[in-house]
Every structure is written in C-alpha cells, then in structure tokens.
Image (spheres, rainbow, N blue to C red):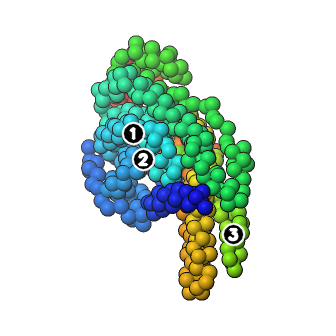
Amino acid sequence: MKKMIKAIALSAAVLTLFAANASAKKADKAAKPAKEKAAKPAKAKPVKKTKFDQKGFDAAYAGRDYAACAGMLLGKNNDKTLVKDLLDADMLIYLAKNYQESGKGFLEAYGKMQETTSEMTGGKGLAAALGGENSLKYYGAEYERYLAWSMRLVNAFNSNQSDVAQGVMKDYTGTFMAEIQALRAQNDEMEKGAEAALSSKEFNDAVKILEEGKINLGISAMLKGRPAKSKEKYEDSAFFNYLGTLAYAVNGDFDHAADFANLKKVRGASAFTKAPAGAGHLEVVALSGLIGKRTDAGDNTQPTSVTFAVPQVMKTVTLYTKLAYPEFKAQKHAINGVKITLSNGASAQAALIENFDEAVRIDVAQKAYGAYCRSIFRNVLKNSVATGSILASGAAMQAAAGNPITAKAAEIAFDKAVDAAAEALVSIEKADIRQGEYFPHKASAAGFDVEPGTYTVTVEYLNGSDIVDTKTIENVVVEEGKVNVAVSACER
C-alpha cells in the first residue's frame, strides 16, 4: 500500500507538470511568367508592426504584400518563436525590396539568436523532455545563422553599401566562428542530455510504476527504433563563402578576396578575385524558390489496452504511445535553373552555389536522435502518470463500493482520468518543425567581364526549358577595373 501511495504521489506531481504544459500552401501555380522591375530601395517605406492575424497574413502573402506580412510577424511578440519570427520578417522585408531595413533586421535577429543560445543548458533539455519539443525558445539552426550573415551581405550589395559588406566580414573574422563553435557544443550537450534522460531516476521510477500496473508499452522496441546518430555536420556555407569573397573584391581588396577564396575553396572565384584589365566585372546573383520544410515523422500513435479490476467493475482502458521527431523529405520546387542575359547580348546559365534544402536535411538528421529520446521519456512518464491516476481512481471506486451514488461518481472520475491522460499525450507529443520559412531554396550566380557602362540584366527562372518567372534589373553600372554586383530573387 505504501508503494502505491508513493507511486500515486509521484504521478500526481508529474501530472500537474504535464497539465501545465498541455495547456501551454498550396504551391503557387503561375500560369504566365511576369516581368518585374526591381524597386528602388530609396522609396521603400519602413515596416510597421501590426496585430498578427492568420487570415490576413495569408491574404497579404497571396497578394505579395510582403511588407504587411512582415509587420504582422513583428507584431506577434511571441517569446518562444521570436527568433523564427524575426528571420521570417527580415526575409519578407527583403522580398519587399526594403534592403537597408532588411539588413539591419538580420543583424538584430542574429543578436537574438546569440542571446537565446546562451540560455541553452542541460536543464533546458530536461524541460523539453518533460514538456514538449516546442517548450523551449527557438534559437536558430546553424545554417540559419550563416544565412542571416549571408543576407546581411546580400542586402549591402543591393543597397550599394560596399562599406557595410566589408564591415560584415570584419565581424565574421572577429566573432562568428567562435560563436558557431559554441552553438555546436551546446547542441551536443542537448543531445547527450536527451540520451541521459533515458537512464535517469525519473525514467526508471516511471518504468517501475508501469511494471507494477502490469502495463507493457513496448519500451525496448522504442529504444531499438531510435534513428541513428548523425555524423553529418553543416561545417560551412558555400554561399556565405562566395559572398564573403565577393565582399572583399567589391571593395578592391583583391588580396583578401583571393586568400579567402583559397581558404574556403570557393569555386569560380578566380573570375572576380583580380582587377579586370581594361574592363569591369559583373557578378549576378540569383536567389530562387523557398527553402524546403521539415515535417513531423508522422502519426504513429499506438494504443495499449489494459484491464483494471476493481470491485464489481472490470475497466478496460486504452493508454497511448506516440513518438514524435523531425524528418526531412525531398520536395518539388518550381525552379531548377536560372539563365542570365545582359543588354549587350551576353548570356550564361547561372551556376549553383548552394542548395539550402541540403542544409535543412543535415540539421534534421542531427536533431532527430535527441528529439526521439525525449519523446520516449515523455511517453513513459506520461503513461506512468496515467497509471497512477487510474490506480487512485480505482481505489476511490473500491472505497465507494457500498454507496451506488458515490460509486458512480468515482467511476466517472476514473473515466475522466483516462481521457485526460490520452488527450495530454496526443496534444503535446509533436515534433519541433519550427524553422525560418522564407529563406531561398537555391543560390546561383554567373559572372561577366564587360566594357564599362550601364546595363540591364534579365534573369529568367526556369523549370526545364519553361520560364517560370522573369526579373529585370535596370541601370546596373559596371566600372572599369572593379567588381560589381547585381542581385535578383524569385520566391516561387
């Protein structure tokens, strides 16, 4: 009896914790390609924060009113998703062609990522194991940090601020790599903490409660089903390395440009790491599509029927296990090629620099093991809580056996305890699929040595031989002996 009382007390305490935690596009099918002229950054209006409304957001996005979408995201003020909202808002501001504000926004977003990272601890990992994958603040994946820095450079190029681009590279050599190493160490700590939770006292006590109730949740099968620990790492960003080399070259610092390109093994950089003799060099960068999304591994809810015997009543109840962890599945994208043509007739197919779907895939593979371990932990603890509640309700039914009215009330309480336990598991057990949603799918580029002058650049975004969209950048000035940059984006 003492063991049962102790088990019920433990279950009640954990149940309170879980109860608190529990309460806590279709593809754009363009029939006809449309030409768009690049808007002038000087005319862009500052984005104003507004109240978030999902229907309003969806309508604004469908109408390509990206500034309105960004304003709603900035107005959410959700502490748990602040970093994600900032990253999404900054990309939408970029798509609205407000380059200076977007560049400043990415700097702020990166600062928030660093603040949140400093809060990542083993204790926070245990909180995720108890409460749910979304119970912690979103701190940004490694590839998102590289992309935030890359977009700072892209915005500097778009607003003709070569000094800002140079400043970004000075910051990079001074702080960024040390911060990335710290993030990697903390991610490793979170994974180790998730694995350690499965041999913790809390976990073992919960297993004993289930065993005393003669409940078999298939824990050994859960443990065997864990995804393999990923050995892949997102070591570096080819896109950032390309842009960094370009930042030095645009400022005429060809020695640093060549050194950085050699260090980072930037392909094709020899075309713009020296001053072009008697001509100018134009590098055209094209960002296409939207980055692929991570998904939940699926609804793998497994019912376990258990019969509890109490005086005059045989109660068969159903407990559930549901393991949640992220996965990445290859998705179809509307754009798979880019052709760039200058007004002098020069034309080239843009070479792929980086496919960011691959970055998402690597990040998901890194995090799936830890998420799966935490999911096992939650399933076992929550079902031990349910078992304790059922045993307590059964004891109340036994005590009330001599009084039909009291017995009926106790039976109703019994049923509610079971239902509450099942609801808590289904509502909390979800994979964390939060990520920045409006980063590009691919970055591509083509370079041209041309006579000094002013050019119009036409960028055709292709699916095979079909033109998905066409963007036109006018008044692109190319100076003799210098490297010049033009950037285009198509978010389809």
Q: Nearer the viewer, mark 2 or mark 3?
A: 3
Structural distance between the alpha carbons of marks 3 and 1: 44 Å
Q: Which mark is residue 308?
A: 3
User: Image point 67% across, 57% down: which residue?
Assistant: 212
The residue closer to the viewer here, 54 or 380, is 380
Element type at marker 1?
Answer: loop
Q: Are marks 2 and 1 in contact (CB under 8 Å)?
A: yes
- The amino acid type, in three-letter code, at marker 2 is Lys
In this figure, what is the number of numbered marks?
A: 3
- Residue farthest toward the front in the current orientation of the protein: 2
User: Image point 35% across, 31% down: which residue?
Assistant: 477
User: Image point 45% across, 43% down: which residue?
Assistant: 124
User: Image point 45% across, 18% down: which residue?
Assistant: 260
Q: Which mark is residue 119?
A: 1
Structural distance between the alpha carbons of marks 2 and 1: 9 Å
The residue closer to the viewer here, 377 or 252, is 377
Residue 112 spot, x, y in % from top left = 35, 40
Q: Nearer the viewer, mark 2 or mark 1?
A: 1
